[in-house]
Image (tube, grey):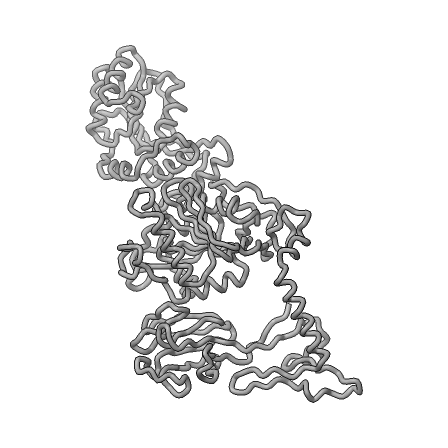
Amino acid sequence: MSKYKVLSCNLVCPNNTHDPIPLPHGQSVQIGRSPQTRIMDPRSSRNQVEVIADWKKESVKVTQIGNNSSALDGIELEKGRQCKLEEGATIYVLAGQYPQKVEFVKEKIPNSNIHSEKSNSTMHSKKRPASDNGHNNNNSKKARLSNAVAVKPESSSEEEEQVKAVEEKLKMMKKSPKKHQEKKTSNSKHSTLNTNQTPSTSKSFSPGSSKCDEKSVKKGVNALGPPKEESKWEYHDKLYVYTGKGVRASSKIAGFDIDGTIITTKSGRVFPKDNADWKILYPEVPGKLKKLHEQGYKVVLFTNQKGVEKGKTLIEDLQQKFTAMLKLMGVSAQILISTGDGVYRKPCLGMLKFLRDRGNEDVPVSITDSFYVGDAAGRPAKWAPGKKKDFSCSDRMFAMNAGLKFYTPEEYFQGQAKAKYEMPDFDPRKVTSGDCLTDPADAKVVSPSQEMVILVGFPASGKSFFSTSHLLPKGYIHINRDTLGTWQKCVSVCTKSLNEGKSVVIDNTNTVKEQRQRYIPLAKKAGIPCRCFVFTASLYQCRHNEKYREMVDKKHKTISDVTMNTMRSKYEEPENGEGFSEIVKINFVPNFENPRHERWYKMFLVEK
């Protein structure tokens, strides 16, 4: 594969109002109001913008020095903040005026397997065509650079004919890409694949799969579909999907969050005050996204917008804002909007599953060659000077669940070093079915004589599963408010069962001392011991369990976070002085119906 050597770098005015301005490697060049740029506007400082070119990386660092706003690809800069831009990006000396483009003049370095003599002769010049008499052609001398602009060498008539023939072939291919594609893939249903790739059938990908199946995707090999001819919106349950004109299915996915990653509020508020309260987060964003498109990536934006389900946000407003955002940046992309709770909401993988199964035209997704960028990264307060704590860790956990490489916006767009971050105390990947059930480990779960057992724990801590698995089969009577309706009914059934000489298990949350005192006197009156089983699952783990139950049981009635948090705020730790003969801690030990459910459980499901 051929490589290139940078010979020079220049700032070129698209309007040809001045000669190219050389940008030496690593040197500061300041431009503004001057004869060099022919800018006479008094709003522009003489040193309005500082530009430093990096020939090795083929990139340029830009810093606004003047007081009035400059811009990068239409995005206003901030005074004193350095931005990095790629070749082809446009610097506006003043916002919206006096455009300057970066151009790198490069020379092709031939393949290493070419004969050394030919290699040496072409390292700094074009190949010299031999004349009939064996003498060198004086018209094919090495191209020279004047005023940092490459001058093309004259070509022989034979070379010109060859160039014209190649150009004609390229024109023919551009005019009939569909025919060319159909010819290559006439016997395959995967006509959207790049003609250099071998079509393959993708396997199903459940919301709880930790990674996409990549057996059919070779690392570094990209499959591409044809560009979309028109933009369109689609709706699927709680998911809205936008596919912009020019978007191509690809095995390489460049995934991004939107709020706090691509855009931020103009007002500086956490949440936008209206539909117009937004701006591009960093000037580097449009150029980076455009370059990804050129490199064969499919740019996909994944965003949680629960405000739609709550009635606080109109989906029409989001659609208008996000399409305006893409238009401003000049970027073709696909957008997936999760409008409520459920499997589509990050960090769950529902949106990625939809993309892979239905949103990528049968082109298999290569997790190895894809990545994800988001600001909900679990960074603590002051992870950088003046920065607040991230509101959640959902973007990082979304990437971890999928097995994707992850970056924050600052790391990806600005090249900052990786910041420290904090994960929740509960890690579902470490939960196993072999954990010890009780603490102490030798505590007896079932008593041979009549007793009362009061369970204490948050919703989804495993109380009901524990009762039905360990106590009810041994004859314990199940006292549960969900089935009996009221606590008064629970007390009545409990009294009746004790009088009949039966053991009982009080399977309610019982997180407050007052609730437990409804039953302890009944055991004392019956002359039997009352044990307390405290379920150790933290509130975060219970929220995780609740999210898991939503995934495996479509009929499950959701318990809100408000209910969970209220119980935690009022929680009173059980004590022996309340009248308990013994207090036993019960650890959460899962029992999965199948490997798929285990994969689902061992994902991060709760965003914060």
Q: Where is residue 242 shown, x and y percent of the image?
A: 44, 50
* Residue toward you, 415 or 274: 274
Q: Where is residue 33 shown, x and y percent of the image?
A: 36, 84
Q: Is residue 83 above or below residue 525?
A: below
Q: Relative to 372, is 6 on the left or the right?
A: right
Give the residue at x 38% y 27%. Answer: 466
Q: Where is residue 243 shown, x and y percent of the image?
A: 47, 52
* Residue toward you, 316 or 129: 316
Q: Furthest residue to the right? A: 133
Q: State the count of labels.
A: 0
Q: Relative to 94, is 592 on the left or the right?
A: right
Question: Which image quadrant for residue 93?
Answer: bottom left
Q: Is residue 106 above or below residue 533?
A: below
Q: Is residue 272 above or below residue 582?
A: below
* Residue toward you, 230 or 494: 230
Q: Quadrant of the N terminus?
A: bottom right
For the question of whether residue 439 can be seen, the reply is no
